[in-house]
Amino acid sequence: MTTFFLLVLVFFSLSAGSLASNYHENLHLQPLPPSSLLASFNFKSNTTRASFDRQHFQYFPRALGQILQHANTQELHLRFTTGRWDSESWGSRPWDGAKEGGTGVELWAWIDAADDEAAFSKWITLTQSLSGLFCASLNFIDSTKTTRPVTSFEPAGDHLPSENLHLLHGALPGEVVCTENLTPFLKLLPCKGKAGVASLLDGHKLFDASWQSMSIDVRPVCAESECLMQIDQTVDIVLDIDRSKRQRDNPIPRPVSPDKLVCDTSKSYHARDTCYPREQKAEKGWSITELFGRSISGPCPLVDGQGANEETVCLHVPQEREAHPIPDSVETKVTGDFTRCFTLPSSTPFDLTVPEQDIDTKVPLEEPVLHAERSIVGHGQERGGMRIIFDNPSPNKAVDFIYFESLPWFLRPYIHTLQATITGRDGIRRQAPTSEIIKETFYRPGIDRERGTQLELGLSVPPASRVTLNYDFEKAILRYTEYPPDANRGFNVAPAVIKVASPQAGRPIYLRTTSLLLPLPTPDFSMPYNVIILTSTVIALAFGSIFNLLVRRFVTAEEASALRAQTLKGRLAGRIVALRDRIRGKGSKVE
């Protein structure tokens, strides 16, 4: 899979090097076991740096460009991700993980500023502006959620030596990615999702996927004597073929009727009311219209170069696998590879049908260079521990990587308890010296309510081994006003970022663990309510008693009787006067 995406990266590198192209878009489809499909949408726009500085935007979105200029941001990377990439079944990540973020929202940027204080001020401006642009909660990235990585991220653009760049990173693992984020993403494209491969991006299909990631990368690219500001937008989704082929008018899956069940009758327990599913050896059939609910609405007219003749849709399957595009499309096969590409006709919508077929050749999935998982261990409300497991599948090569962890301030780790354990393929465990596994350490402790804890470790995992890191931590007690409404759910801990050096690819490989839920000691939130009710009752009784003493008149029983009699006489006299006036009034009307 990595080789397939490297070819795409080389293609875009050549396009960027020529500085003649302004907009390109591509869609790459690859079936994944057992019955999934990886769809990678890539959109790339360029504008000259001089035009960008003068705010003469052509293919570059003006809304995003003005935000970057106002915040002095020279390079930007924004990720919206949901789900989990199953590396054991799907192999290595697309784009070597370079366009993937942690669960929720992740943002890092290089800002040109005089000092750290000015850089953080621009960072707050950037997050608040992007929050409004993408309808996300990026404005909640404050000082407690901001870190300054040292070696985990590298600039992807060509920056001037005179620039004083500051790298800032923030993550919101609890952010829910939805259609409100997809719509602003599509509005940044030249064709706004109305034409080209972006016309397939429908929120109902995109967010029904098993895993999806939307990324935006802005960087300066220089070649020869001219520099560009390049924006690269990518959408990677893994669709479940059977679930995606369900009709829009059938949103709730219903049980399959008995006559449509495919059962393995060779099982001894097979009966009329017992069915064991039969293994499907044939590759599942699908089409673009079935998976996305629509066809591609022709090429985007703003695509430079060959226009409609550009190879836009690519399929990564064995050469003997049948694929039927519409008649007006031209197919191109890459010799010695599993890739075939198709052009989009300019007059008719494009559709691609891949029928169900039983073939022996399989597309080899590249084994990930490293497997990683992270979990919280321990019990109780006061202390706990973190366990990180790294598994090196290579039988003869060690893996060197950088492990970056950003912890909230209310999780206080004890770095002196950090221990490493090595487990070989033979299952024998041994306690390894810390210096054997951890080559370098960067630790910035957190400050309560000001900043979180930052931990970066340079690690090395021996061949065919599993390394387990453990350390203890303490949980802080928050003020009752700092708890969210769903405090008993737990507090989100951002995923860890792993940067693996890859000499073959020439660029690092990135992996991210899953996010964590940290339970904290939670007070009884009914007590403030009880205190308020009791206090209000006491105040009401005291105020009522004092008010009665101040305004009530105290008299004897005789005086009260006399006043009552006078009051009764006055009422009767008033009634008599009123009745007399009414009688006189009627008499005058008769006259």
Image: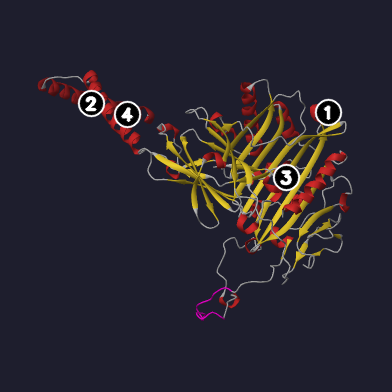
Q: Quadrant of the N terminus?
A: bottom right
Q: Is residue 414 visible?
A: no
Secondary structure beneath dot 2 equals: helix
Look at 38% across and 41% down and name the residue there.
Answer: 381
Which type of secondary structure does the marked residue at label 3 adopt? loop
* Residue bearing mark 2: 571
Q: Quadrant of the C terminus?
A: top left
Residue carrying label 3:
503
Earlier-in-chain disc, 3 versus 1: 1
Tag in front: 2 or 1:
1
- As drawn, the label of residue 50 is 1
Q: Residues within 10 Å of mark 3 (few under 14, many from 20)?
A: few
Residue 114 picture quarter: top right
Q: Main secondary structure of the magenta part?
A: loop
Query: Distance between the Cα atoms at labels 3 and 4?
Result: 111 Å
Give the residue number, with chain letter if any, for mark 4. Answer: 582
